Every structure is written in C-alpha cells, then in structure tokens.
C-alpha cells in the first residue's frame, strides 16, 4: 500500500524521543520503495509520499515525492545515482484537487524498478 510519509526527516530525528523508531517508520512503506526513501531521507531530502507502483498501487511506477527549492531535485538525483539506483526521471509535478485547484510544484523522482527487498 502506498503511503504518505509526511515530514520524514523530522519524524526520524524525533523518533528516539516520542515516536516510532526509524526502522518502524520505514517498515510502514511499500517494501519496493523503502530503500530509496531511506537513502534520500538520510541525505536530508524531505520526502512526503512514496509508492512502489504497479497494479493495485497509486502510482504506475516506483516513485518518491519530496519538498525542496529549485536545486533539490538535482540533489536527490545525485544522491540516487551515487547509490546506483535505477533513476527513470526527476520531475516537478502539480496535483489537482477535486475542485480543479492545482497545487505545487512538488519534486518527484521515479525509478525503472523497485528496490530489492
């Protein structure tokens, strides 16, 4: 099941004090995207949504969405490539709510395949 992982970096740093451990937090993510989110989060990329993609999932492909200014997408790309991840695309997306109001842009990094579990 795809998960919204709001304020992942904040949650990970506070986990020792009040919330679930980092390991427990990562275990709530789709197994095929967990490694990607873990590495991006550890590098300071503020992820907020992820999905391993495919049938029965919200996304067609494995992807992670994250917050950031102009250069953050390229920073995430560099981190992913340094770890040998199969990056398919880095893009900015706008979501549109049910009232037709666009929100964004938000960064998204997509992968050719799921991470090994």
Image (tube, rainbow, N blue to C red):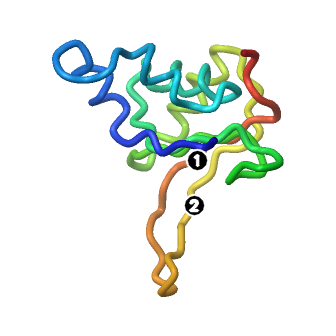
The residue that mark 2 highlights is: 93
Q: Secondary structure at mark 1?
A: strand
Vertical arrangement, residue 81 with respect to residue 108, above or below: above
Q: Position of residue 106 (x, y in %)?
A: 48, 55
Residue 62 seen anywhere in this rendered image of the structure: yes
Regarding residue 71, the answer to whether it shows in the image is no
Q: Residue at x 71, y 22 (%)?
A: 85
Asked if marks 1 and 2 touch (Cβ < 8 Å), the reply is yes
Q: How many marks?
A: 2
How packed mark 1 is, by other alpha carbons closer than 10 Å (few <14, some 14-19, many 20 or more), is: many
Give the percent coordinates (x, y) of residue 75: 50, 32
Q: Report which quarter residue 44 is drawn in.
A: top left
Of marks 1 and 2, which one's residue comes earlier in the chain? 2
The reply, left or right, for residue 107 in relation to residue 81 is left
Which residue matches tag 1?
Answer: 108
Q: Is residue 54 left or right of residue 77?
A: right
Q: Position of residue 20 (x, y in %)?
A: 32, 20
The C terminus: image quadrant: top right
On screen, 2 above or below 116? below
């Amino acid at each position: 099941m795809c998960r919204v992982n709001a304020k992942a970096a904040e949650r990970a740093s506070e986990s020792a004090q009040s919330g679930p451990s980092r390991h427990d937090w990562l275990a709530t993510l789709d197994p095929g995207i967990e490694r990607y989110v873990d590495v991006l989060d550890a590098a300071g990329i503020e992820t907020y949504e992820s999905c391993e993609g495919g049938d029965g999932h919200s996304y067609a492909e494995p992807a992670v969405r994250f917050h950031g200014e102009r250069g953050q997408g390229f920073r995430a790309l560099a981190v992913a490539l340094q770890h040998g991840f199969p990056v398919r695309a880095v893009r900015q997306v706008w979501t549109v709510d049910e009232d037709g109001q666009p929100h964004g842009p938000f960064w998204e990094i997509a992968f050719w395949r799921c991470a090994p579990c």
